[in-house]
Amino acid sequence: MELESLELEELVLKESIVSATGLSADFLQVGIKGDPSLRETAMFRPRYHSVLDEIYPRLEQHLLELLCERSTYHLYIGFSSSEIRTQSVFDPLREETHAAERLLEDDYLARHFPRISYEAKVQGMREMYDYLLGSRMFDSLPEHWKKIFARRHKEWHPMDRESIAKVLGSLKALRDMPDYYVRNATISMVQGIVRLSFNCDGTQLVNAENYQRFLEENLSV
């Protein structure tokens, strides 16, 4: 039974692109290809300039504030749609959608995103998982999943503030790339992963700790 549990644990972690423990440290990034017709026509489709393209230089600091000084722990930035999707530590099972231009308003941020320090938010996430691991729901899991979650929780650390600032600071350059440019980006403090989707329908999953290397290889910065 112990051997079977270990084999299942290894299989679960091996099969997922992003597993329960995150993106494997062996990978700088993982690329996912989608509809080939989008790749073939990417060079011929006119570039769409959205409201978010115009305001991003001013919006960047507000997005940094959401992740480092307010309740947001998961952030989706949709350049093509000008939508910002957020998830809050105070309501972690729900996703909210906001018009990007509204996030330029200080009063709007204050109404929708309670202040909480980065340190308190990280501690809150640890406490949520402490509760989950001690719950009756967790007791119902198969043994191999219990081991995966327990080990992940013990070793977990969030995306740090410097990495968050680096990612947000790079998106304008990725959006302005001449041929294949970013359409949307997702930042997860919990998993420490940046998800970047491009106009050619390619998606890159990048470990936050490897993000500078990713930029150097793709932007020469």
Image (tube, grey):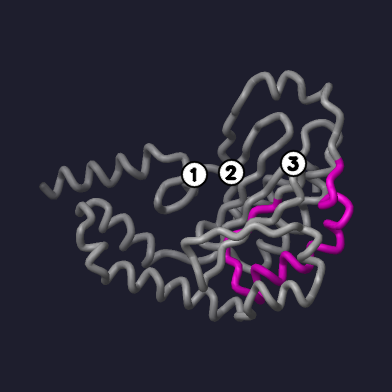
Which residue does the numbered mark 2 point to in the structure image? 205
Amino acid type, mark 2: Leu
Q: Is residue 152 magenta?
A: no
Tell me the element at label 1: loop
Q: CA distance from mark 3 to mark 2?
A: 13 Å
Which residue does the numbered mark 1 point to in the structure image? 26
Q: CA distance from mark 1 to mark 3?
A: 24 Å
Amino acid type, mark 1: Asp
- Name the quadrant containing residue 8: top left
Decide if residue 78 is on the left or right side of residue 194: right
- Nearest the eye: 193 or 6: 193
**Badges 1 and 2: C-beta atoms under 8 Å apart?**
no
Tell me the element at label 2: strand
Mark toward the start of the polypeptide (3 vs 2): 3
Between label 1 and label 3, give the one nearer the viewer. 3
- Nearest the eye: 196 or 53: 53
Q: CA distance from mark 1 to mark 2?
A: 13 Å
User: Vertical placement of 18 versus 87: above or below?
Assistant: above
Residue 38 screen position, x and y as percent: 70, 24
Which residue does the numbered mark 3 point to in the structure image? 182
